[in-house]
Amino acid sequence: MREFIITTAVCLSAMSQMMAQNISGKIVDAKGEPLAFANVVLLNRQDSTFVNGAVSGENGCFSIDSSCNGRIIKVTSVGYKTVFGVTLTCCRKN
């Protein structure tokens, strides 16, 4: 199976405790080419329950509106090895 690499940029808006966080990134294959229409799922770390998800665009980019503390990202795409277990920890600026 072909493997792909996840480049994840975690973007936070830390102006207020009430503001939502946004997890965004770009899915690329081993050659650095964008991987279109990959499934990106955010899971709860404790029990692997679904939190939120997205599908990467034609350019490989995705965005998920959700808090990322204690979460795991799972990326799947037909014909590629599943990437599972990339944990995210986010911090807010004081």
Image: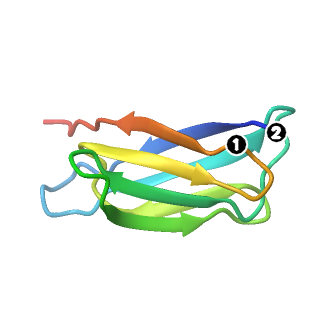
Kind of residue at badge 1: Lys
Location of residue 17 (image quadrant): bottom left
Answer with left or right where residue 85 lies relative to residue 13: right
**Above or below 31: residue 17:** below
Residue 42 in picture, x, y percent from top left: 40, 56
Between 94 and 25, the residue placed more toward the observer is 25
Residue 75 in picture, x, y percent from top left: 58, 51
Between 2 and 60, the residue placed more toward the observer is 2
Q: Of the residues under marks 1 and 2, which one precedes in the sequence?
A: 2
- The quarter of the rendered structure image containing the C terminus is top left
User: Which residue is pictured at 24% across the width and 42% down the height?
Assistant: 70
Kind of residue at badge 2: Arg
**Above or below 19: residue 43:** above
Q: Which residue is mark 1?
A: 81
Between 94 and 37, the residue placed more toward the observer is 37
- Answer whether labels 1 and 2 touch (C-beta < 8 Å): yes
Image mark for residue 2: 2
Cα gap from disc 1 to disc 2, whole angstroms: 6 Å
Looking at the rendered structure, the secondary structure element under dot 2 is loop
